[in-house]
Amino acid sequence: MSEILDQIKAAIERQLRGPAFSNLLKSFGIDPRRYWLLMDLFHKLSTRDEMQGQFGLQSHALRVSAAWFFLFSAAPAAGGLILQARAWVVAGIVLAITAFTLIAVLLSEAANSLVNPEEALALSHQPITGATYTAAKLSHLLNIVFYTVVGWNLLPALATPFMKDGGWSYPLLDLLIAMTLGVLIALFCCSIYGLLMRVVPARRMKSASQFIQAIPIAIFTLFRFAPRGSSARVYRSLAVVAAPLQTVPWWLLAPAFGGIAIAVTTIGLRSLSADYLIRASAMVHGASNATTRVRRSLLGEIVRRLFGGQVSRAGFDYVKRMMLRDWQFRRRLLGLMPMMIGMLLGMFGSGLAAPFSQGFSAAHLIPHFLGFILYVVCILLPYGTDYKGVWLFLLVSDRALGRFAQGVHTSLWLAFIMVPNVVLFPLFAWRWGFATAGGFLLFSVAASSIYLTFGLRVIEGIPFGKQTQPGRDSAGQGGARMVILIFVTLAAAGIQYVLFRSVIAVAIAIVVLSAAAYFLTRWSLHSFEAAIRHHLSSTSQTSTMIYTEVESG
C-alpha cells in the first residue's frame, strides 16, 4: 500500500510543478521558483533527519500511520457490509473520524511549523516573501491530509457500492469529498494561528498555540469520561440554542455559514503572509526588549538549604524552567495528556476504596502510575530544542556536577512525587482517615522514588542537551523499556495489593522501600553524574572534529 501511495503522490507532484499550478501560486503572491526551492530544501532536511518535529515530512511515519488507519477502517467497512447499512451513513461516520483525526494532528503540526520556525531565522535575510515561505512550510501538511484521508477512507469507499443505496460512483465521490474536507481543515487550522498572530504578542504565541492544541484533547476527555447522561444533556442544550436556526431554509443557512468560514480562513491565511518572517525571531526567542526580574522562590531556597547548596538549586531551577519553556518537550508531553487524564479519571471513577479493604482498590495503582509518568518524563528529558546551548555547562567546574545532578533529582522528586501525594492527602484523609492516608502517603512516596532512581539512568547527560536521534522520535526512543515498565508496574501493583492485607507488612515494606530508595538514589546519582561528564567531554571534542589540519608541501 505504501508504494502505491508514493507513486500517486509522485504523479501529483509532477503535475503541480507544471505551469498551471505556477500561475495559481503567482495569483496568491507566491514566487513559484523559490517555493519549489524551499520545498526541495525541506525535503532534503527531512531525509537527513534534521527536521524531527515535522510529522508531515517523515515519510516512514506517515506510511505507518496510514497503514494503521487502513486496518482500523476495516471495522466500519465490515460493519456496513454485514448490517447492510446505508452507504452515506458509513461514509459520514468515517468522514467524522477523519475530520477529528486531522484536526487533532494538524493543529499540532501547524503550531510546530508556524510557532517554532527555527529554520526561518536562517532565511530571514533572504529575498523570500512571507507568503512564499509559509506556503512552502505548510505544504507538508498536505502530506498528512493525503495519507490520513486515504488510510481512513479507501477501504470504506471501496465497500460502499455493495451497501444499501450504494453506487459504483460512490468510491470516487467519497474520496473526493474526503480529500476536499481534509484540505479545508488544513487551511482552517493554519488560519487559526494567523488570527492568533493578530491579537497575541509574538513572545506569547507558544503558550497560546499549546492552549489551542489542548482543546481537542479536552473535548475528547470530557465526552469520554463525563458522567453518564451528561453528553445527552449537552446535545439537548445545543439543540435548544440552535432551535431558531431550524426555521431558516438550508439553502440560505449553508451559504451563510460557508461564507463566514471562508472569510475567517482567508483573513487568517493573509495574516500569515504579511510579515511572518519578521516575527519569526520574536516567536522563537521572545521579545528583545523583555525585562527580567529577580524571583526569589521559597521552594528554591528550601532546596538550597537542604539539598546541596546553590549549585543544587541551579539544577533544580534549570529543569523546572526548561520543562515549562522547551517547545518540543511541552509538545510531546501534551500528546501524553489523554492517556494520563484517562488513567487518572478511571482510578477516581472507581470510587477509591481504602487500600486495606478486602477488594482491589484503584489506590494500589497510584504510586505506580506516578512512577510510570515520571519514567516517561525521564525518557523525554534528554532532548531539547536548544540543545546547542549545552556548551555553557563546559564552564562549570567538575566538582559542581554532582550537586547539579542532585538538584535535577530534587526537581523531579518534588514535582512528580511529593506534590501529587501532598495534594491527594486531604482527599485520602477525608475518605479513609488520617492514619490510613498517612501510611499510604509514606508507602507511595517510597515506591515512586524507586521508579525515579531508574528514570535518572535514562537521561544519560545534561537534560535538554541532546538533539533527537536521527530517524527516531524522542518519545519512542525507550520503546522496549516502556513495555518492560508496564509489566513491572502491573506486577508491583499486585504485590502492593498483597502487602496491604496486613498493617505490619505495610510498615515493614515502607522501611525496606525507603532504605532501598536511599541507596538506589545514591547509585543513580553517581551514574547520572558520570553520564553528565561523558556528555560534556563529547561536546568539548565536537569542535575539533569538524576541522582537518592540512600540511603544506
Image (spheres, helix red, strand yellow):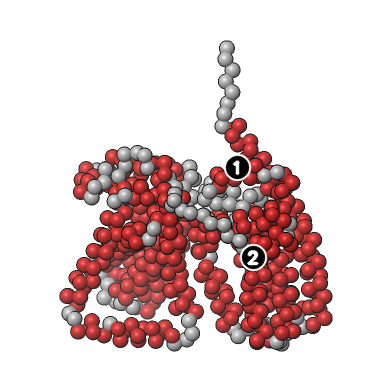
Q: Is residue 153 visible?
A: yes
Give, as a three-letter code, the residue at label 1: Trp
Image disc number at residue 481: none
Q: Which residue is the site of mark 1?
A: 391
Crowding near pointer 2: few (<14 within 10 Å), some, many (20+)? few
Crowding near pointer 1: few (<14 within 10 Å), some, many (20+)? few
Disc 2/disc 1 C-alpha distance (Å): 29 Å
Q: In the image, what residue occupies the spot 44% across and 49% down? A: 288
Q: In the picture provided, is 95 more to the left or to the right than 431?
A: left
The quarter of the displayed image where residue 84 is located: bottom left
Between 434 and 479, the residue placed more toward the observer is 434
Considering only order in the chain, which callout, 1 or 2, is on the residue closer to the N terminus? Answer: 2
Q: In the image, what residue occupies the spot 30% across and 86% down? A: 240
Between 297 and 20, the residue placed more toward the observer is 297
Q: In the picture provided, is 107 more to the left or to the right than 481?
A: left
Image position of 281 with respect to 431: above or below = above
Helix or strand or loop: what does disc 2 sit on?
helix
Give, as a three-letter code, the residue at label 2: Leu
